[in-house]
Image (cartoon, helix red, strand yellow):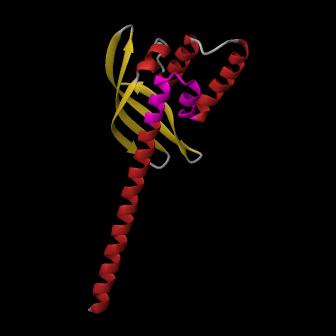
Amino acid sequence: MMKRTAFHALRLMTVTAIALSVLCGCGSRSAEIENLLSKFETSCNALNIDDMLSCVNPSVSDPIKLGLGVYNMFAQGVSDEVLDKISGALSGDSQLKGNEFFSSVKIDVKKINARSKDAVAEVQISYTLLGQTFQKEARFNCVYVSDQWYIGGFRFR
């Protein structure tokens, strides 16, 4: 009888430990993604393209960084056209005006569904275009690459 009780107690502790590790792991991923989106928002508001691109999946950002390197050899500063291209590449909306959008964007995370290598963050984005403020629901797709979370893209809903 004593062995049976000890076995059940051990089994219960094992199940509890596994459940806690799974729950803590999800919380950690969600916190990392929330920090990523916060860093992205801050770099957008400052129009800091290098920091913005450091938040984006290298498969998307590396070609942009290469193009910016060549562009910067011949131009002074970052043009509105470059910001328009970045906003278009990330959102899939080529009409989105990058400078005004990025400098005014606010990201309010509502829900994060994180798995081991990808995640979806449901957010509300506030931004200003042509003096008018908009609020839209959006979805950030995030990917885990080389031990780090990145933004893979986003879509307005």
Judging depth in this view, the residue of 75 and 56 nearest the camera is 75
Residue drawn at x 55%, y 11% is 80
Task: Pick the residue in front: 11 or 36.
Answer: 36
Residue lying at the far bottom in this picture: please name it. 1
Provide the major secondary structure of the magenta segment: helix
> In the image, residue 69 lies at what x, y percent?
69, 22
Locate residue 17 relative to residue 96 in the image: left or right.
Answer: left
Instruction: Classify 121 as above or below 77.
Output: below
Q: Residue at x 56, y 30 (%)?
A: 51
**Which quadrant is home to the N terminus?**
bottom left
Name the residue rendered at 58%, 15% in the picture: 82
Where is residue 155 drawn, in percent x and y? Answer: 42, 25
User: Does residue 127 appear to the left or right of 40 in the view shown?
Assistant: left
In magenta segment, residue 61: no
Q: Position of residue 124 (x, y in %)?
A: 33, 28
Q: Nearer the viewer, residue 53 or 114?
A: 53
Residue 37 figure quarter: top left
At 40% from the left edge and 52% from the top edge, which residue is drawn? 26
117 sits left or right of 2 in the view: right
- Where does residue 105 sit, x and y in percent of width and height? 40, 22
Q: Is residue 55 found inside the magenta-colored segment of the image?
A: yes
The correct choice, above or below, for 102 with respect to 14 in the image is above
Within the image, what quadrant is residue 112 found in?
Answer: top left
Q: Is residue 8 above or below residue 92?
A: below
Q: Is residue 87 left or right of residue 107?
A: right
Q: Quadrant of the C terminus?
A: top left
The magenta segment is 37-57
